[in-house]
């Protein structure tokens, strides 16, 4: 479902025979990767990854343990606490809790999934309906140096993170396959980061940032999330299109759709009909009628000439893929939100 259209035009960039392509942004709610049953109200997050307390990473002869570089275990705590915070802020579950005890006493990077009995015990103790276990957490920071002109050195400091999580029902059965997440962040500059002691603030900031970002990203694995996406529509200098543009700027998509529908019925030029059908598809999507939007983008697609490689063809194909994906995702989204699918009703006849 579309949350709202931001009626701010980024730019009117593409001009071709008095045709303008207008770009806007739209917030779209996407389903979570994992679907929880409606009766699951309370979640407990368990740090089931082995401690990295014995790590002795060195750089240019400097031991990390001798410096104030953030440890992997500290980054892990930041990650789990951020994940708890973000999930609670969504108010999708009644409560998201963190289990305060270690559950994996193995060696570094030793993955030991929780047994069904462990899961049952922890859920009973924390009054949870389901459990999310962090079975693996890795974070690294490294430096790449590139020589540039005038013998100066350009440095890139980057952090990488990798996690693996499992989700369990209260009875100890796995609710989904293991969930892996890998990401990286970069910091660029001409700073002298050749010595570890010279780059501690930058390393710590980067590791903190990537830990929080990973928690934010993984929240959408468990909870339906809003994503900002780009959209576009076409206009020209005609009186009718100018009126439609005014309606769009004021968020009046129904009125704009009515104008585009009337123009579509009268239009004989193929490319103009394609653009109008695409506009009507966007109006329907903006009014949260994705099924009708798919119908209209299909009309635009069917009007495309064979073997065309034009920008218009590429744009129609791209939008068709976007709308088809939304339509396919909607049943899962409605189920996760516990709402009935909207009644199909044509917005533009």
Image (spheres, helix red, strand yellow):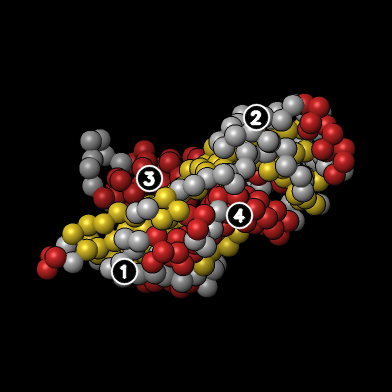
Q: Nearer the viewer, mark 3 or mark 4?
A: 4
Residue of label 3: 318
Q: Using the numbered discs, state the Cα–Cα distance from disc 4 to disc 1 in whole angstroms.
A: 26 Å
Q: Nearer the viewer, mark 2 or mark 3?
A: 2
Q: Position of residue 142 (x, y in %)?
A: 38, 52
Give the side of residue 123 with respect to residue 300, left or right: right
Which residue shows up at 23% across the image and 36% down it?
A: 307
Q: Residue 81 got which mark? A: none
Q: Secondary structure at mark 3?
A: helix
Q: Using the numbered discs, state the Cα–Cα distance from disc 3 to disc 1 in whole angstroms.
A: 42 Å
Q: Position of residue 183 (x, y in %)?
A: 46, 47
Vertical placement of residue 199 versus 275, above or below? below
Q: Position of residue 303 (x, y in %)?
A: 33, 41
Does the image show residue 24? no
Query: Which comes sooner in the sequence, label 3 or label 4?
Result: 4
Q: Secondary structure at mark 1?
A: loop
Residue of label 1: 191
Give the side of residue 152 with respect to residue 259, left or right: left
Label 1 Cα crowd, 10 Å radius (few <14 / some 14-19 / many 20+): few
Image quarter for residue 89?
A: bottom right
Query: Which comes sooner in the sequence, label 4 or label 2?
Result: 4
Image quarter for residue 41?
A: top right
Q: Residue 112 got which mark? A: 2
Residue of label 4: 74
Q: Secondary structure at mark 4?
A: helix
Task: Say which of 94 and 247 sits in front.
Answer: 94
Query: Which comes sooner in the sequence, label 1 or label 2?
Result: 2
Image quarter for residue 180?
A: top right
Q: Are marks 3 and 1 in contact (CB under 8 Å)?
A: no
């Amino acid at each position: 479902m579309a949350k709202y259209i931001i009626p701010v035009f980024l730019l009117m960039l593409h001009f071709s025979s008095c045709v303008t392509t207008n770009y806007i942004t739209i917030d779209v709610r996407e389903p979570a990767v994992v679907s929880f049953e409606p009766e699951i109200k309370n979640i407990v997050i368990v740090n089931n990854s082995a401690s990295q307390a014995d790590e002795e990473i060195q750089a240019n002869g400097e031991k990390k343990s001798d410096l104030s570089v953030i440890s992997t275990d500290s980054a892990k705590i930041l990650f789990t606490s951020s994940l708890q915070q973000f999930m609670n802020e969504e108010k999708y579950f009644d409560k998201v809790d963190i289990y305060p005890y270690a559950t994996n006493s193995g060696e570094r990077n030793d993955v030991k999934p929780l047994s069904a009995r462990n899961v049952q015990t922890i859920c009973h103790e924390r009054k949870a309906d389901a459990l999310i276990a962090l079975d693996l957490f890795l974070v690294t920071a490294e430096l790449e140096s590139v020589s540039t002109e005038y013998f100066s050195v350009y440095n890139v400091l980057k952090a990488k993170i990798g996690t693996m999580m499992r989700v369990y029902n209260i009875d100890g059965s796995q609710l989904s396959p293991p969930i892996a997440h890998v990401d990286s962040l970069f910091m660029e500059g001409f700073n002298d980061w050749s010595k570890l002691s010279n780059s501690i603030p930058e390393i710590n900031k980067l590791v903190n940032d990537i830990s929080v970002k990973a928690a934010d990203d993984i929240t959408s694995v468990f909870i339906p999330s809003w994503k900002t996406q780009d959209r576009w529509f076409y206009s020209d200098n005609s009186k009718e299109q100018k009126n439609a543009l005014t309606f769009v700027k004021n968020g009046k998509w129904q009125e704009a759709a009515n104008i585009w529908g009337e123009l579509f019925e009268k239009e004989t030029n193929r490319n103009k009909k394609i653009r109008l059908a695409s506009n009507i598809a966007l109006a329907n999507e903006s009014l949260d009628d994705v099924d009708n939007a798919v119908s209209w983008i299909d009309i635009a697609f069917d009007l495309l000439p064979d073997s065309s490689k034009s920008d218009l063809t590429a744009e129609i194909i791209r939008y068709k893929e976007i709308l088809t994906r939304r339509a396919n995702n909607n049943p899962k989204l409605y189920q996760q939100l516990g709402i009935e699918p909207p009644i199909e009703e044509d917005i533009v006849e």
